[in-house]
Amino acid sequence: MSEAFLEVKNISKSFVGVTALEDVSLTIRKGEIHCLIGENGSGKSTLIKIIGGVYRADSGTITIEGKELYKVQAIESIRSGVQIIYQDLSLFPNLTVAENISINQMLESNQQKVNWKQIRETSKKALEEIGESNIPLDERVENLSMANKQIIAISRALTQNAKLIIMDEPTSAITKEEVDHLFSIILKLKKRGLSILFVSHKLSEVFEISENITILRDGKKVGQYPTADLDHDKLIYIMTGCKLEFSPYIYNKKLRQEKPLLEVLSMSKINQFSDINFTLQKGEILGITGLIGSGRTEIAQALFGLNRPDSGEIWMNGELTDIKNPEDAINNGIALLPEDRLNQGLFDFQSISDNIIVTILKKFLNKMGLMNSAKRRKAGNDWVEKLKIKTPNSFNPVNSLSGGNQQRVVLAKWLATSPKVFILDGPTIGIDIGSKHTIHNIIRKLAEEGMGIIMISDEIQEILDNCNRVILMSKGRIIKEIKDSRTTNSDELFEIITKDTAAGVNA
Amino acid sequence: MKIKQLFSHNETYLMMIVIVFSLVLTIINPVFFTLENMFDLLRSSSGTAILAVGVFLVLLSGGIDVSCTTIAIAGQYISVNVLIASGIDSIGLAFLISILIGVSLGAVNAYLISTFNLPTLITTLGTSSLFHGLLLEFVGTKAVNVGDLPESIKAFAKVQILNINRPDGTSYGLSIFFVILVAIVLVTWIILKYTMIGRGIYAIGGNREAAKRTGYNVKKIQFFVYCYAGLIAGVMGVLHLSLIRYSNPTYLVGKELNIIAAVVLGGTKISGGSGTLTGTLIGVALITILEKNLILIGLSSYWQKFFIGLIIVLGVTITYAQNKISTRRNLAMRGA
């Protein structure tokens, strides 16, 4: 066993009386890929910020390569070889790849003049080190994909003589293929003796990449295990402190009607999707999955009037409908939970209550056309209670809530319109496991009561666990429909999707 | 490939508009495309172009400065009054005083913006009014006529670096104003391209938070930007005085929007981080040609406002449309 690079001992930290970390210890060896896992609010971010010298611990010690850092400053941490890649990557979108990679080194060397030759050489070398020399040095970073942006951030860390790279949720915005590619880079770094601290809450990835796992819950370390000693269920149990039951969703055939709730006939839109046909019955949870760019989100938006198809028909309860805008969709009983809930689903600074009732404001008008505040307030509070949104007060701004609770607010907002068809695009993106489970249960309950649900996700397992029927998409077409999700498994589905996509790339 | 690259730049399209417009003007009035008229245009637009360089720098850093014209007029009016009162007839002193005033007023902007982290539009809107009020109350409101103007200032406008004789014995030439413009553009370009503070301006305009985390001294960079913009405004104040041979403390103020428009038209993003000096200069050229030449085509000067407005709206629409197209293209590429 190689020696330790980083030793964190008995760290505690509290913010204005609230304990964020309590007596947490963590050891990372040289060349080790270590995973830090825990639900939102468990203290992961606080811990990495303390290691990075952004926050100062109230007590405890941090030792890097045997040398204890007294009151870690950000610059000390960087000089000892610790590089943190935050979720937002801290890149400059307006500058070129080369400049983004070399910028830290330039600043560190404290020179006043800019040496463009050196910038190119530094960045070229950094990209070559991880085998990514095909990224053009003169391209502006804003024109790169999310995955390539990440590679730029990693290369930048390398120019700083990084010995430990901490990645905060690096896989939250990239596709499965890109995750695989990222992992191959991480393994390259490991071979060179670098240590990696990988912060995540996606369990499958954690199992794939890490050697050791440290688990935090409510600011306390609840365990450090070799990855091999854990399995999926055990890890969830340690993380959440409770056992979560998974059972497939079974469609109640009694709810079936002669005329389907929703029927889509040969819907097409140039460059997005073509010849889309499917039906949805009352009480069904229909899963749609495929890689990013497969057209799944575009279809959801088309059904909700945000993205008008070029041709095709949408039938609701046996009647042909024309959905030109979201208002038409709402009037037809269709609701959409958007993929990007922060930009599309919430008014950040407004209250939880107002965010929920915004879809049904008209209901609170009295005869004079004025708002009845008492009714409005009551409706907001009712929903907060119904969906168990954790807040001391429904008038707090919605951005005071955690991700899982925010998602419940968006759910409540659309449920208030009592939809017949509810389209959920990535309902649990960026939400931790406990909350995820609650949201799945809410969705199932809605379907059991007769609502038709379309669930879109790139997590195949999530689709299989919660949907009775699944549609697979690739490059804008439906490539397969699985009538009963119990007859298949996630590996099989993944293979179908990637095979088809790869075939298209080679063609 | 090279041509394709050329057409990926906004500047190319803008330059084409300038050329087409000039051709139309030349067809209507052949006088337009003469060296003499070009020299004259350069002289009369140098001031606007110089001020535009300052505004460009501020926009690049992610801010906006609407006080630049007020600073220019303050520099001009105070320096000319000092020259008259002291009896020292020196263009050098005029520049020195105007630049000192420009830098000090710029420093006030810089201090407020960098120390208290204030929104730049509101801050400069406020200081603009504040500076102007102080100027009118404490320095005066009386215009300085050509008769009272120090000789050196009048003479400066006539300095030429290139002299061409007409057949009838008179001559015309390229004004020293152009040299000053070129010098300022060159210095600014070098700062932006080859100094860390210049790259820092791009960095804070692109992602302020990241710049801070990376270790840039954001306050220092902002301080530099607003002081530099003030310095430039000071230079422009004296040029303007020398050109029109008259100083009225209510002149210039209100023209800042035209200048910001020229810079934005030149492709500089109003949200910061992106833009070029070339684009800025072409933007100024377009607005200047329009301003000075509508009369040549026989349109009243009231049409100026209309056309400037039209160009701004069209220019911004085109820029946005282009961005949208390239974003879509990127998305499509990701999808493939």
Image (cartoon, coloured by chain):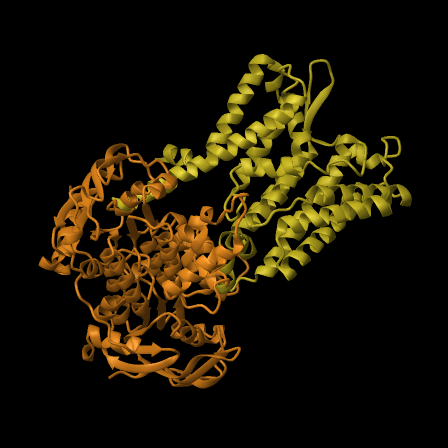
Chain colours: A orange, B yellow
Q: Residue B190, how many percent across, how many down? A: 56, 48
Is A148 left, or right, of B151 in this rendering? left
User: What is the residue that sits farthest to the front in this orientation?
Assistant: A367
For the point 62% across and 51% down, the residue is B120
The residue lying toward the viewer, choosing from A316 and A202, is A316
- Which of the image's four quarters has the C terminus of chain A? top left
Pinpoint residue A58: horizontal percent, then vertical percent: 49, 83
In which image quadrant can residue A226 be found?
A: bottom left
> How many labels, in total?
0
Which corner quadrant holds the N terminus of chain A? bottom left
The residue positioned farthest toward the left in the image shown? A487
Horizontal placement of A20 versus A499: left or right? right
Q: Is residue A6 above or below residue B322?
A: below
Q: Is residue A458 visible?
A: no
Q: Residue at x 32, y 59 (%)?
A: A429
Residue A60 in the image, given as x and y percentages of width and height: 44, 86
Relative to residue B68, is residue A441 depicted above or below? Answer: below
Name the residue nearer the viewer: A266 or B155: A266
Task: Give residue B136's position: percent from left, percent from top.
Answer: 83, 43
Residue B298 located left or right of residue A236: right
Q: Residue at x 45, y 62 (%)?
A: A381
- Please tell me which residue lies in front, A428 or B323: A428
Closer-to-camera residue (A144/B198): A144
Does residue A482 appear anywhere in the picture?
A: yes
